[in-house]
Structures are given as C-alpha cells and as structure tokens.
Amino acid sequence: MLSRVRILIACIVTTVAPGVHAEWFSYSATAMTTPIELEFWSESAEQAGRTRDAVFAVFEDIDQRMSRYRETSELSAVNRQAAEAPVPLSESLFAVFQAAQRVSAQSQGAFDISFGSVGYLYDYRNRQQPTDTDVALQLQHINYRDIVLDETNRTVFYSKPGLRVDLGGIAKGYAVDLGVEVLKSHGVRHARLSAGGDMRLLGDKRGNPWVVGVRDPRSEARNAVVLPLADLAISTSGDYERYFIDEAGNRVHHILSPQTGRPVQGIQSVTILGSDAITTDGLSTAVFVLGVEKGLAMINRLGGLDAIIIDEQRRIHYSDGLATPGRAASQ
C-alpha cells in the first residue's frame, strides 16, 4: 500500500518520566510531491509504526485519486470525461470538489479549481510559461460555476468543454485532515501532521503549546512570525513554493489569478488558521488572490478564522482575531 510513499526518516525521541514507556515518535516521508512530517505521542514503537503506516497510506490514496500529474488518477479521468456526461466520483473526491466549490463561493471566485485550464501550460521545473495568446485562449474555461455537482448521484459535470480541474490548492489539506482522523482512531491525542504548507495540530504538546513558525518568504533559515498553538489547522501559501525567475527578472510562481491566468502580484505569503486544513488550504490561496484588503475583510467576515499576510513590501498584516505575535519580517 505504501509502495509510492518513500519513508525518509524514522526516529524516536524519548522524553518521559521514570516508569513511563510512552514516547514521542517522529517520521518523515514524501507523497503528493511534497514532504510529509509526522510527530506524535505513542505507547510503543510497534503501535507507532502501525499508526505511521496508516497515516501515510492516506496520502498515497489521495495522491492516486487526485493528482493531475498521474494519467491514471481518478481526477485525470474526470478531466477527460466530465465535459461529455456526468461522471460518478468516489466519496473522497466528491468531498474535495464540494469543499472547493464552497471556498470558491466564499471568495467570489478568487479560489477556483478550474484554474487548471491555464495552469497546465506552466512548467516550473523547465522554466516555461505560456504566451499571452495561449493564456487568452484558455481563460474562457476558468469558471467554477461550470463545475456542476449532483449530490444525489455523487457526480460531476463540466458544462463547458475544455475546462480542467487542478486540486493542488486543496487536496493536501484534505489529506492532512484525514490523517488526523486516522491518528484519533489509533488513540493518539497529541500530534503534529504537515504536508508542505498545510498542518494540523492535534491537542497540545503534552502541557505545552506547539511552536509553529511562519516562514520569512525570502529566507528559508528564519521565521517572520512565531506562534504558540494547539489543536487547530494552519496553512501557508507562498510565492516561494514553486517558481522561477524569467528573463525579465519577474518571479513566475504557481498561484495564478483566475482572472488573468498569470501569477498574482502584491503578496509574498498568506497564512490561515482555522479548525480544519481543507478550509485553511483553500482560503490561503483565495486570500493570496484577493489581496490584503479584500482578503482580510473576507476572513474577518467568515469568523472562526485568522490570517497573517506578508505583502510585497514585506509588511505583515493580521486579521482582527490576532494580536501582533512575534517580530516583523526584515525590510
């Protein structure tokens, strides 16, 4: 089951009182083209190993179903067929489509999984981007309203031919949420699970908060903000995740505007805090696209969420629910 999940590190850190055999276990893996980090408190190495395998299996399953890079994935099949007739979806894929549509409606289309209609034209590894003509031809296919979901029959239909969906902005959050449910089912009460920029904290760190850093977008070695947190989700979208610098010196990154089909300008990173990662994952992209003023207004209006935005001038902006925690990014 874990054939495509490559476990990189499996280490045990013992921090227990005399007579207590439970320990902290930490594991790392690669799945969904991103690093997976898992840390949790468990009663034994054997139990921890079973829990680790079950959590990593979640990421393998979601990758197999929802990757647009796999021709054999369920999502790739949907992209090929859904403009011809309604396509039945697995329960998990339908749930992600539903969540994506919810975030699209909340953000008035700033988050739109049909951005894949243009997104596939970019090749960040080979430093290639589409021409203005190519973008203009594909922009007409970006509209989340053309993705028609049927809850009764659990199907999806693309009402406009040429539309392509990319779930890169929400599927990892969903996998993190499922991973946390697996941890709970195995009796884990204290854990940290992350997939790239998406993280869930289960409980606290046994009497202490988890300390989570929001990375300085222009430095891998330091944080712009440090937060003491417990029992929540946190997702960060940044212009440093997948990008290249073009011949004109512009940063060509993967967060595209559904309106222009080009990388969004004006923001370096957005961090959203909330109760579940599928929501914080989608909203971090939505706020990035909306910009500081409209993005913060949306987060403050929705309630139960908070945001930290670092703009292109390296100023840090907070939603109403956050005091100023930590230091600002260096100028």
Image (tube, helix red, strand yellow):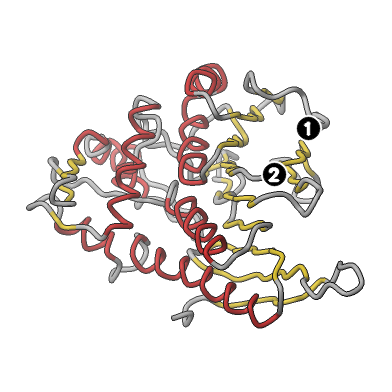
| Residue 189 figure quarter | bottom right
Q: In front here: 57 or 123?
A: 57
Residue found 33% across the figure and 57% down from its top: 92
Residue 233, percent from left and from top: 58, 44
Local secondary structure at mark 1: loop
Residue 180, percent from left and from top: 54, 57
Residue 177 position (above or below residue 13): above
Residue found 47% across the figure and 82% down from its top: 3
Residue designated by label 1? 329
Q: Quadrant of the C terminus?
A: top right
Q: Earlier in the sequence, mark 1 or mark 2?
A: 2
Foreground tag (1 vs 2): 2
Q: Could you tell whether 242 is left or right of 230 in the image?
A: left
Give the Cα separation between the discs numbered 1 and 2.
24 Å
Residue designated by label 2? 230
| Residue 304 figure quarter | top right
* Label 1 packing within 10 angstroms: few (<14), some (14-19), many (20+): some
Local secondary structure at mark 2: loop
* Label 2 packing within 10 angstroms: few (<14), some (14-19), many (20+): many
